[in-house]
Amino acid sequence: MSSPDPAPTEPDLAEQLVRLTRRMHRAQQRHMEDLDIALTPAQTRLLRIVDHYRDQAPRMADLAARLEVVPRAVTTLVDALEAKDAVRRVPDPANRRVVRIELTDTGRSTLRALRGARRDAARDILAPLTAEEREVLGGLLSTLVDGAATRC
């Protein structure tokens, strides 16, 4: 009689998480290529962050803080996204020296396509799991995400 498989060790789990993350990224990139979207991961993240500011478009300093980068790095990202007509710089109505960044219609459309590519990639990766296994995995991931959020 064979013994049950030993539980994975933390280094094994870490490696599996890294491999799964890479696989998810590659699958998302494939779906984005199908949509003819060429953005860097940093540009994609900046679009998502700008979209989270619903009440008032963020300032460059807000974006730098959220991305944890120097303001010059944000300028480079905004320049590239502005060239793709995904964002635009607008003066702050209360202080004309302040520049805010807002999504354009193209930027919102791009974000919708990116979210679709992410969902399609997840669907591809999760295909081998049953509905019950996906539900369990979702619960486990929520626990990890929520636990990480309380420590940050």
Image: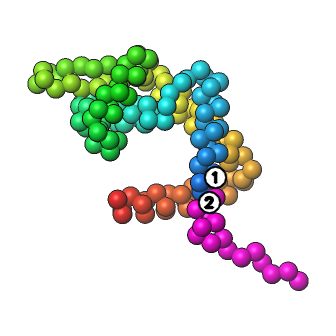
Mark 1, residues whose alpha carbon is within 10 Å: few (<14), some, or many (≥20)?
Answer: few
Q: Is residue 92 left or right of residue 117?
A: left
Query: Which of 134 and 111 lies nearest the eye of the viewer?
Result: 111
Q: Residue 73: which quarter of the image?
A: top left
**Percent x, y for residue 55?**
25, 32
Indicate whether 129 appears above or below 55: below
Q: Residue 101: which quarter of the image?
A: top left
Check disc 1 and give the amino acid type: Arg
The image's colour scheme reads: rainbow
**Percent x, y for residue 87?**
36, 21
Q: Which residues are magenta?
A: 1-16
Q: Would you name the residue on which mark 2 appears? A: 15
- Seen at 54% across and 24% down, the residue is 38
**Percent x, y for residue 14?**
58, 62
Mark 2, residues whose alpha carbon is within 10 Å: few (<14), some, or many (≥20)?
Answer: few
Badge 2 marks a residue whose secondary structure is: helix
Q: Is residue 6 left or right of residue 94?
A: right
Badge 1 marks a residue whose secondary structure is: helix
- Asked if residue 134 is among those painted magenta in the image, a careful observer would answer no
Q: Is residue 135 left or right of residue 56?
A: right
Check disc 2 and give the amino acid type: Glu
The quarter of the picture where the C terminus appears is bottom left
The CA span between labels 1 and 2 is 6 Å
Q: Residue 91: which quarter of the image?
A: top left
Q: Is residue 59 visible?
A: yes
Q: Is residue 12 left or right of residue 40?
A: right
Q: Are the residues tagged 1 and 2 within 8 Å (C-beta)?
A: yes
Q: Would you name the residue on which mark 1 appears? A: 19
